[in-house]
Structures are given as structure tokens and as C-alpha cells.
Image (cartoon, helix red, strand yellow):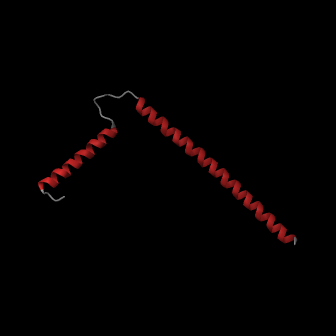
Amino acid sequence: MGTMTSDLATDLIMAAVALSALAIISLVALRGWRDWIQLKREELAAGHGAAQDPTVPHAGSRIEIADLKERLRKLEAIAAGVDL
């Protein structure tokens, strides 16, 4: 009977240690996630607040313009009957 109690106690201790380790890892990951989100918020805020030359389009705008030009080129090719 002593062996069964010892095995049960060992199993309970191991389960408690594993649960504690999981809780600690989860809390550390959550803290890291929150810090990363805060960093991204600060980066976005810094990007919007920076003085920018109004003649130079924003990088996102340049990407959108390039995408629109590519779509227009494809539509013109379709209209002309060219197979892409």
C-alpha cells in the first residue's frame, strides 16, 4: 500500500510542476505578446506623426499605384486581345 501512495504522490507532484510550468510559460508569452503589440502601436504612431514631404507619396500609396498600373496594363492587354 505504501508504494501506491508514493506513486500517487509522485504523480500529483509531477502534475503540479507541469501545470505550474505551463502557467509560467503562458504568462511570459502573454507579456511578450502585449509588449510586441505596444511596440507596433508606437511604430504606427511614430509613422503617422512624422513630418513628410507632401510631394513624396507614402510607401503604401506607391504600392497601391503600382498595383493599379499593373491591373490597368492587364485590362488593356485583355481589351486588345493579347493573351497574357
Q: Quadrant of the C terminus?
A: bottom left
Q: Residue at x 80, y 66 (%)?
A: 8
Q: Please state if 30 lies on the left or on the right of 45 as rendered.
A: right
Q: Quadrant of the N terminus?
A: bottom right
Residue 63 lies in quadrant: top left
Residue 58 lies in quadrant: top left
Q: Please state if 39 lies on the left or on the right of 65 as rendered.
A: right
Q: Residue at x 20, y 52 (%)?
A: 74
Where is residue 36 shown, x and y percent of the image? Answer: 53, 42
Q: Please state if 3 lies on the left or on the right of 51 as rendered.
A: right
Where is residue 42 shown, x and y percent of the image? Answer: 49, 35
Where is residue 61 shown, x and y percent of the image? Answer: 31, 39
For the view shown, which residue lies furthest in the right direction? 2
In the image, residue 16 above or below residue 70 = below
In the image, residue 55 above or below residue 70 = above
Q: Residue at x 14, y 57 (%)?
A: 82
Q: Residue at x 42, y 33 (%)?
A: 47
- 21 vs 81, nearest the viewer: 81
